[in-house]
Image (cartoon, rainbow, N blue to C red):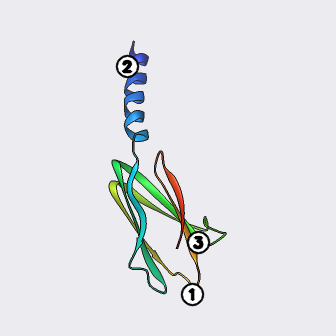
Amino acid sequence: MKHLTLFSLFIALLGTVWGAEIVKGPYTEDAEQKSAIVKFVATETTPAWLEYGPVGKCNQLMAISAPSRIHRFVLHGLTPNTQFCYKVQNFIYSGTQNS
C-alpha cells in the first residue's frame, strides 16, 4: 500500500510539472551589441534552461533559472554583428528561435 501511495503522489506531481506550457514568448528584450534578455512565461512554476550560441551552434552556452512562472535570462558577451539562436526548455516545451 505504501508503494501505491508514493506512486500516486509521484504521478500527481509529474502531471503538474508536465502540465506546464509556455503561454508568452520566448522573446528577446533590450537587445544590444553584446547583450540581450530572453523571457518567457509558463502556466506552472517550473525550472527552465536556455541554450544559446551563434546560429548553427545554438547549444554552446547554457543558463538555468530557478523554478518560476516568469523566466528571464540575461545574455552577456555576445559578439557584435553576429546572429545568435537560443532554445528555451521547461518540462514539456522546447523551442528554438533565431535573433
User: Given the image, on which type of amino acid does mark 1 rest?
Assistant: Asn
User: What's the residue type where badge 3 is placed?
Assistant: Gly
How far from the left and from the top, in percent, is residue 45? 33, 48
Amino acid, disc 2: Thr
1 and 3 marks in contact (CB < 8 Å): no
Displayed quadrant of residue 10:
top left
- At 37% across and 19% down in the image, what residue appears? 5
Residue located at (44% from left, 84% from top): 32
Q: Distance from label 1 to label 3 (Cα)? A: 13 Å
Mark 1 or mark 3, which is nearer to you?
1
Looking at the rendered image, the disc whose residue lies closer to the viewer, 3 or 2, is 3
Q: Establish if 31 lies above or below 47.
A: below
Numbered mark located on residue 5 in the image: 2
Secondary structure found at label 1: loop
Judging depth in this view, the residue of 94 and 1 nearest the camera is: 94
Question: Residue 22: x, y in percent?
Answer: 40, 52
* 1 or 2: tag closer to the N-terminus: 2
Q: Position of residue 80 (x, y in %)?
A: 55, 87
Please tell me how crowded label 1 is: few (under 14), some (14-19), or many (20+) other residues with Cα within 10 Å.
Answer: few
Residue 53: mark in rendering: 3
Where the N terminus falls, by quadrant? top left
- Helix, strand or loop for disc 3: strand
Residue extending farthest to the right is 56
User: What residue is disc 1 on?
Assistant: 81
Task: Report, in whole angstroms, how far the alpha carbon at label 1 lies from the one at label 2.
Answer: 56 Å
Picture coordinates of residue 69 (x, y %)? Answer: 32, 53
Q: Along the polypeptide, which appears first: circle 1 or circle 3?
A: 3
Classify residue 64 by image quadrant.
bottom left
In this image, 88 relative to 67: left or right? right
